Image (cartoon, coloured by chain):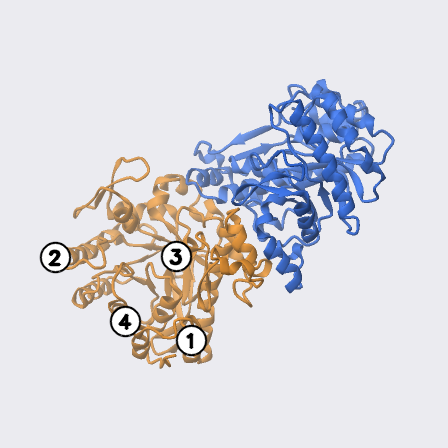
């Protein structure tokens, strides 16, 4: 029987890797940015448009899908792939993060999490077994273990408790997982920014052999130095021959730096969320199309970009359209998604071509051109990755 | 005017509602209703576009090779145009609210946009308008028409007058007579007809149109029906010689999470031969309704089927009722995208069928056959 995940590294530059990940619904080139389709839709962007952008792996949220349309219905129609008509790969998270961040009442015990549904205020209970059962019904190619989620900046006994409970829940997740043949369960490394707790989590979770691992509990308000050092600690220890997924990270600078640190997969809602407020990604930073400066700029958001927004419209037109019709937000979302997808492909190619250093320097030079200075944490992180960066 | 019938699809600033260029591909939309009020606030930008770049207005809005139809009244907006006592202009709904504009500004904008068709500026009388307001509306509409014909005679723009007057036949006669001078102008093509609202009786509509056509009998003019572009109005209008229709119903219905359910279009020859080829009478439309389906629907596995299994639109070929209903329940805007595609596809099929029947000189027979399914 073919494996549900095969990970082949084609080229490296120290920690950075250019790889191919083969999943049940096809090949994914890594490093990769995974767009987030929370409730089985990408906020104004159809799945056919996602396919047209070259997306081969995207996210959906178990927490939301469990409520609507429900795991049972999805199972009856043959899973989420069939329901939304997406022929490529899907990753579902466990629902842990949404549960804690969205629910007013949330109480964690060893059994699971008791929370108030934000939809109809009923009290619900989510155990590891429940999360895995729903994810089995959804049928994603990669599923996430239910973890005990706490704020990144939490310290003391609660963080230790969450760390250890996550490991015990992982064992229950593994035991409950009924589709090991075609769904890859990724454990989630926890520990906040405490190196000792991270080490403990890494040791415990690596022992439970998985086809890939996620780095959780970051991008939650911690300082950037702690952020990159924690990522580096994880990627240094995690098995080289398995993909590493950094959860909730999707700022262009962060994905470039963390790819250099050895991360293979990223996800973040920022690209589409900020698009709905009229902000577009460019090589020179964020472009706020609602600003009056864009009114008379008769060029695309980014020259050379092949997305339908840039091929069809100018900044000027989008500036005016944002105020009038929501298709403007769809177009900017498409642009931002395309930007990140292409950024990852270009970074990956530079690893294969042996010019990652030039690529990263070129990227940072443009991104920080207006500010005139690259932040020190980036220089240090890339230095650690043996990627010399010239300050501007 | 290009091929009949001409379906003039409404846009917002030249962009079709809910449709990215990718999603438009399967629809072959070839017309755009350009609402003047969308562009007055960006006149400086349009001037710069023209003077400082090689980008045409059509390229700017990404509607090259489309027929542009510019008008001051856009049914999709509530209270688009208001009257004012000043004889030089009207008030138009713009980005920053309802503001006065002059006919000179309107014509200047028309030069920047350079549409194929321009509906002359008009003052839309209020629902409860009295005689004085109505008279002012006709006189101003006629004045604006003359000014546009004179000021834009050096362009390639075809100009249509705007006939107001509601469905009162006497008022319609006055409105039409005021603009009869336009026939002598080479850049004048016909009239856009206002006031034929959905809520009015078919008999009133028939009477009003008959009267109008009698005034212009013998003249080679074309008529465009303003408004929602509902299917029954299109069928009625086609039967009575109206060649163009402003269309917003597919988008409006999608916005309201409705799917248009149109019966079968394809009749066999012997199905329609039994019907009369005369114009459709008002009483043949009474009680007729086009069905539609509201979303969301019950979350039943049985609904995991296309909106219409025989439909070849992008939405029906790729998605199911169950999925669309899920999108609606989750308040995901993709629902409106898919419903717009399906609804617009129905209109395009209708348009093709009407053209075909017109070419075969079986239009009224087909319409009668179609109506009996409702």
Q: Share a chain, discs 1 and 2?
A: yes
Element type at marker 3?
Answer: helix
The answer to whether A342 appears left or right of B182 in the picture is left
Residue that carries the numbered disc 2 in the rendered image: A157
Residue depicted at 52% across the width and 46% down the height: A324
Quadrant holding the C terminus of chain B: top right
x, y percentage for residue A127?
Answer: 24, 45
Q: Left of B217 or right of it: where is B47?
A: left
Pointer 1 residue:
A365
Q: Locate the N terminus of chain B by quadrant.
A: top right
Whether A189 is drawn above or below B21: the answer is below
Q: Nearer the viewer, residue A81 or A346?
A: A346
Give the labeled residue for mark 4. Answer: A232
Mark in front: 1 vs 3? 1
User: Can you name the residue that lies furthest to the right here?
Assistant: B218
Alpha carbon of mark 1 to alpha carbon of mark 3: how far?
Answer: 22 Å
Q: Earlier in the sequence, mark 4 or mark 2?
A: 2
Q: Which mark is residue A270?
A: 3
Which hue is chain B drawn in? Answer: blue
Q: Specify the colour of chain A.
A: orange
Crowding around mark 2 (Cα neighbors within 10 Å: few <14, some 14 to 19, many 20+) is: few
């Amino acid at each position: 029987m073919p494996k549900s995940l095969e990970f082949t590294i084609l080229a490296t530059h120290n920690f950075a890797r250019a790889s191919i990940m083969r999943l049940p619904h096809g090949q994914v080139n890594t490093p990769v940015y995974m767009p987030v389709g929370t409730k089985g839709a990408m906020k104004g962007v159809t799945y056919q448009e996602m396919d047209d952008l070259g997306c081969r792996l995207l996210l959906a949220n178990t927490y939301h899908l469990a409520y609507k349309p429900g795991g049972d219905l999805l199972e009856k129609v043959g899973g989420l792939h069939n329901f939304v008509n997406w022929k490529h790969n899907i990753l579902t998270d466990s629902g842990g993060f949404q549960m804690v961040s969205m629910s007013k009442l949330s109480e964690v015990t060893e059994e699971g999490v008791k929370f108030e549904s934000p939809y109809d205020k009923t009290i619900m209970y989510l155990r590891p077994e429940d999360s895995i059962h729903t994810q089995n019904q959804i049928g994603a190619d990669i599923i996430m273990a239910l973890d005990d989620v706490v704020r990144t900046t939490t310290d003391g006994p609660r963080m230790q408790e969450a760390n250890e409970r996550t490991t015990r829940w992982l064992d229950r997740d593994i035991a409950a997982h009924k589709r090991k043949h075609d769904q890859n369960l990724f454990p989630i490394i926890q520990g906040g920014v405490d190196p000792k707790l991270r080490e403990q989590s890494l040791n415990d979770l690596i022992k439970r052999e998985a086809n890939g691992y996620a780095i959780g509990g970051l991008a939650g308000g911690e300082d950037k130095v702690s952020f990159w050092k924690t990522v580096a600690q994880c990627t240094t220890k995690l098995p080289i021959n398995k993909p590493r997924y950094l959860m909730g990270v999707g700022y262009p600078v962060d994905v470039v730096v963390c790819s250099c640190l050895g991360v293979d997969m990223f996800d973040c809602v920022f690209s589409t969320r900020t698009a709905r407020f009229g902000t577009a990604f460019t090589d020179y930073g964020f472009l706020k199309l609602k600003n009056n400066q864009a009114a008379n700029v008769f060029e695309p958001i980014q020259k050379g970009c092949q997305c339908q927004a840039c091929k069809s419209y100018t900044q000027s037109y989008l500036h005016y359209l944002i105020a009038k019709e929501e298709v403007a937000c769809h177009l900017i979302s498409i642009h931002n998604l395309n930007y990140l997808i292409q950024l990852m492909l270009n970074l990956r190619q530079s690893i294969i071509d042996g010019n990652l250093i030039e690529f990263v320097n070129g990227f940072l030079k443009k991104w920080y051109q207006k500010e005139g200075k690259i932040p020190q944490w980036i220089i240090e992180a890339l230095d650690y990755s043996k990627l010399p960066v010239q300050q501007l | 005017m290009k091929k009949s019938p001409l379906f003039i699809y409404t846009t917002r600033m030249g962009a079709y509602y809910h449709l990215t260029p990718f999603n438009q591909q399967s629809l072959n939309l070839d017309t755009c209703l350009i609402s003047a009020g969308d562009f007055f606030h960006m006149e400086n930008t349009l001037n710069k576009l023209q003077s400082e770049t090689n980008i045409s207005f059509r390229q700017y809005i990404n509607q090259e090779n489309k027929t542009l139809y510019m008008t001051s009244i856009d049914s999709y907006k509530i209270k688009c145009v208001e009257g004012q006592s000043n004889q030089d202009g009207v008030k138009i709904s713009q980005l920053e609210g309802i503001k006065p504009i002059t006919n000179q500004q309107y014509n200047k904008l028309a030069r920047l946009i350079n549409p194929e068709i321009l509906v002359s500026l008009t003052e839309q009388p209020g629902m409860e308008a009295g005689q004085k307001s109505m008279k002012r509306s006709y006189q101003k509409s006629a004045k604006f028409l003359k000014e546009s014909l004179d000021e834009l005679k050096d362009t390639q723009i075809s100009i249509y007058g705007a006939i107001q007057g509601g469905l009162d036949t006497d008022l319609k006669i006055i409105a039409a007579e005021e603009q009869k001078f336009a026939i002598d102008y080479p850049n004048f093509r016909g009239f856009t007809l206002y006031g034929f609202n959905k809520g009015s009786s078919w008999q009133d509509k028939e009477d009003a149109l008959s009267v109008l056509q009698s005034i212009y009998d013998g003249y080679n003019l074309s008529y465009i029906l303003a408004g929602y572009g509902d299917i029954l109005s299109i069928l009625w209008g086609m039967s009575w010689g109206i060649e163009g229709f402003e269309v917003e119903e597919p988008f409006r219905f999608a916005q309201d999470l409705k799917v248009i359910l149109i019966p079968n279009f394809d009749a066999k020859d012997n199905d329609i031969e039994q019907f009369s080829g005369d114009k459709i009478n008002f009483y043949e439309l009474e009680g007729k309704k086009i069905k539609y389906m509201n979303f969301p629907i019950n979350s039943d596995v049985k609904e995991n089927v296309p909106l219409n299994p025989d439909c070849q639109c992008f939405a029906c070929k790729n998605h199911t009722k169950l999925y669309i209903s899920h999108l609606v329940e989750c308040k995901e805007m993709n629902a409106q995208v898919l419903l717009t595609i399906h609804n617009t596809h129905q209109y395009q099929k209708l348009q093709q069928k009407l053209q075909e029947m017109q070419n075969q000189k079986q239009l009224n027979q087909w319409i009668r056959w179609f109506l009996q399914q409702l």
